[in-house]
Amino acid sequence: MKTFAEFGLEPKVLQAITELGFEESTPIQSKAIPIALTGTDLIGQAQTGTGKTAAFGIPLVNKIPVTEERIVALIMTPTRELAIQVSEEIGKLTRYKGLRSLPIYGGQEIGRQIRALKKKPQIIIGTPGRLLDHINRKTIRLDDVQTVVLDEADEMLDMGFMEDITSILKLVPENRHTMLFSATMPTNIQKLAQQFLKNPEHVSVIPTQVTAPLIDQAYIEVHERQKFDALSRLLDMESPELAILFGRTKRRVDELSEALQKRGYSADGLHGDLSQNQRDNVMRKFRDGSIDVLVATDVAARGLDVSGVTHVINFDLPQDPESYVHRIGRTGRAGKEGTAWSFVTPREIDHLHFIEKVTRQKIAKKPLPSIAEAIEGKQRVTAERILEFVENDAINEFKAIAIQMLDQYDSVNLLASAIKLITGEKKDVSIELTPEDPIRAKKRKPDVRSSGRRFSGGPFGGGNRTGGGSGSSSSGPRGRSDSGRGDSRGGYGGRSSSSSSTGSSYNRDRDGQSKGRTEGRSEVRRTPRPSSDE
Ligand SMILES: Nc1ncnc2c1ncn2[C@@H]1O[C@H](COP(=O)(O)OP(=O)(O)OP(=O)(O)O)[C@@H](O)[C@H]1O
Ligand SMILES: [Mg+2]
């Protein structure tokens, strides 16, 4: 792999990259950076957690002169949390060069953003709704923008976002440099790319499977009513360092995080009905490790990069294979290993097979962890904690009593009692969750357009950079969640599966139902609103 020095970057940018601890470029970086540096439009696809942010961030930061006082670069992301995160990474890349970047997202006080805009940032990272809000207020002008990046492009370019994105891009000069990035590229992106990009290069580093290679995937077949106990056992058995638990709806997330807390786990929820303050707090607690389990809707499925996430658990199966890929991609990032578990109810087995088929990845079936395995898991954690103490902590002051106790009692009995005490009793609170309907497998027609065409790698692309087949978008109606995300999808054009999606069972809102309220995307279709909550 190339070193960053080989790209001919400015020394200050190189210095920032070194500071980030990046020794050599990842495959998507070594392919995309040279192309992006020439100003060629590009569509970049690579597995989750492989450094796509820096793949567009480095060339972007490299080319903006420090003397610039106008907004010359615009990065759009589908969620607020991602806008904040990308802005932070861009901030790190420009640390020595000294450019100004600013995240612009819904839920944050607009006056604060307007004040920050007066400092003349060159790079704006925003969610579409709030960007439009500023554009309408004339607090953001895009007349001087030279570079546009759509991160999570397939999500961004999805039907629910089309109008917003189109309105925004109309205000950006046509001779701009445009880049789209995602780990998944459904066929319909082709049509949309034609509208927004000029002769784009397709840079794809998806080998055989789209899911990141270091994620160990498994599923457990459980009845809806057994799910929570299965979860407790799984968490006890696996004792994740940090875990993200995906639920289908906001109500589910609320109920799950409350239930986990009642059972004594350190968990909190993230979804689009929370205030931005609450969302920020939960993310902060998760990032600094003060909670171990982040319970979330698909609002957390895309792009989030939290180091130390060892496990992703799909408490409910996601509605589409892309979501599965992105959700499980919250672990196994930047060369680290991760584990992904999915709960599948008997009626959802077909849907699981569909996910396997589209992702070209077998997901191993594992038995429900037994009570014994759960107990053993917890004891193992206690034992590890004790050993860490033995190695690292000052324990001299406890030695006298230890010697005294060992004189009187059997050492095995003593240690076993200590382990029992530290492990603690599980709080046996009974939990009732509102059941969710199973997800039905969709019937898909075989895709006649697939082989040898541009996006022949399937719904998730495949590295074929030749050909010029036009993808087709056949998504059903959809709208967006209040979190500023669209939902997917539709046309999966693929070698192995594929199709066109027309049914409505697939087209539910990402965040799903909230406290009994359905937020189906077909119902929340919207046009740009001047005061978006995004
Ligand atoms: N060259 C590199 N060497 C080491 N680590 C890197 C390198 N490039 C990026 N990283 C780190 O890898 C992690 C994942 O990067 P990033 O979030 O950009 O992935 P991504 O490809 O955008 O994933 P996703 O599809 O989930 O959005 C980050 O923590 C980032 O700092
Ligand atoms: Mg990303």
Image (spheres, helix red, strand yellow):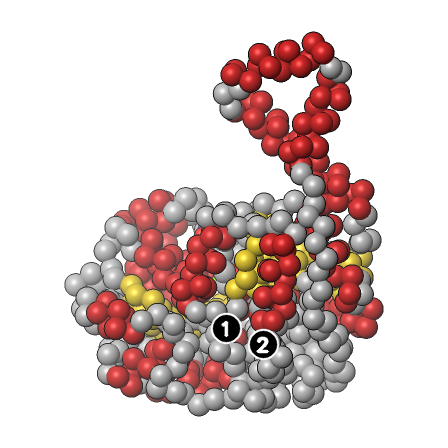
| Image-quadrant location for residue 318 | bottom right
Q: Is residue 350 above or below residue 532?
A: above
Other residues around mark 2 within 10 Å, as few (<14) / some (14–19) / many (≥20) = some
Left or right of 41, for residue 185: right
In the image, residue 164 lies at what x, y percent? 42, 84
From the image, tell me which residue sits under label 1: 273
Left or right of 357, for residue 164: left
Look at the numbered discs 2 and 1 and tell me whether their residues touch, using CB distance below 8 Å.
Answer: yes
In the image, residue 349 lies at what x, y percent? 80, 69
Amino acid at dot 2: Ser
Amino acid at dot 1: Asp
Quick one: 451 or 257, which is closer to the camera? 257
Q: Secondary structure at mark 1?
A: loop
Residue at left offset 31%, top offset 71%: 109
- Residue 379 is marked as none
| Image-quadrant location for residue 18 | top left
In the image, residue 241 lies at what x, y percent? 58, 45
Residue at left offset 71%, top offset 64%: 432
From the image, tell me which residue sits under label 2: 514
Q: Earlier in the sequence, mark 2 or mark 1?
A: 1
Other residues around mark 1 within 10 Å, as few (<14) / some (14–19) / many (≥20) = some
Residue at left offset 75%, top offset 41%: 375
| Image-quadrant location for residue 402 | top right
Quick one: 17 or 295, which is closer to the camera? 295
Quick one: 415 or 520, which is closer to the camera? 415
Whether residue 346 can be seen here: yes
Q: Is residue 403 above or below residue 36?
A: above
Whether residue 210 can be seen here: no
